[in-house]
Amino acid sequence: MIKPESLKKGDKIATISLSSGLAGDKEFRCRYEIGKKRLENLFGLKVVEMPNSLKGSKYLSNNPKARAEDMINAFKNKEIKAIFSNIGGDDTLRLLPYIDFDVIKNNPKIFMGYSDTTVNHFMCYKAGLTSYYGPSVLAEFAENVEMHDYTVKWIKKVLFNNKTIGEIESSNYWTSQMLPWENRENSKIKRELNKEKRGYELLQGEGVVKGELIGGCIEVLDWLRGTILWPDLEAWENKILFLETSEEKPTPIEIRRYLRSLDAIGIFERLNALIIAKPQAEKYYEEYKEEYLKVIRDEAKRDDLPIMYNMNFGHTAPMFILPYGVEAEIDCDNNKFRINEAGTSGL
């Protein structure tokens, strides 16, 4: 995997709408502007909006090729050092016919987003480029009142230097409260924070287990099976799979089905470990744990496969960043998670 160069103040970064066009809709445009201002003022970056990114939901829904062109042109542009997704959605898969994987491979740069952006991460993965499962502009960068310190810390540590990332501790708090974005006054109201009572939970496993990171939103991964983006079975060997669930809060039965499909194609027999994000609003918190153990421990007969649960990535805030293809480790005996490499290359 090719690691892109780390960011520095003054770098140009592209904001891009690859699925939903909310960032360009008049009722949500103010939310985008807050995120843009944070990128500029808090991180010292210069924001370049890709030509189609703010044309709104109707246009972008009708023009997947335009969204794909924004992505490819952002990679081609030598002045742009990173590409940040404005928001996810459910439509990124329609970009696939228009993607030039050689352009991505030959123009390595930071690409970051989550949720439906899982599709774009697997485009980067197919091209051999390390990308970053992490904050989006409308959600985390435009967080009400101010960004979470925990999120800011990991953005700076992962994207702005080329030192080993190291141990990632659980956040002391979390929130899933949704204050409607279309109400501008809500941006002035800080979301209610919940004290973290559990921290990381080890569902099973022992010792220290290492592997390169791969994964994403479990619902979106289910859409990728059978496409050219789905890695060969050999690519899953000795990996640490990370999984999270969306704001749609799939039922435990749906989780069981997603996991069974992964088992049926031979994924679990090849993995070294799994890490699982906190479910949004902690809905189905205990039920999800039961499903992971039912399928992996009981059905797949992998009672030796370490599973760490309740981690801070995905659809709860705050969040850390996971770089694809980079070695991480789970220390089961001490309930710790760390990333053993730098996320980026040197300047």
Image: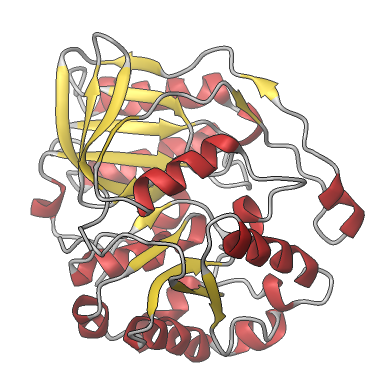
Counting from the top left corner in percent of width and height, residue 68 is at: 44, 84
Q: Is residue 341 above or below residue 120?
A: above
Q: Nearer the viewer, residue 89 or 319?
A: 319
Counting from the top left corner in percent of width and height, residue 289 is at: 45, 22
Q: Quadrant of the N terminus?
A: bottom left
Q: Is residue 47 left or right of residue 320?
A: right
Tell me which corner region of the image, top left, top right, bottom left or bottom right, holds residue 118. bottom left
The total of numbered circles placed on residues is 0
Q: Nearer the viewer, residue 318 or 69?
A: 318
Residue at x 20%, y 76% (from the top left corner): 105
Q: Is residue 35 left or right of residue 152?
A: right
Counting from the top left corner in percent of width and height, residue 148 is at: 62, 39
In the rendered view, how is the structure colored?
A: secondary structure
Residue at x 16%, y 19% (from the top left corner): 208
Residue at x 34%, y 32% (from the top left corner): 275
Tell me which corner region of the image, top left, top right, bottom left or bottom right, holds residue 274. top left
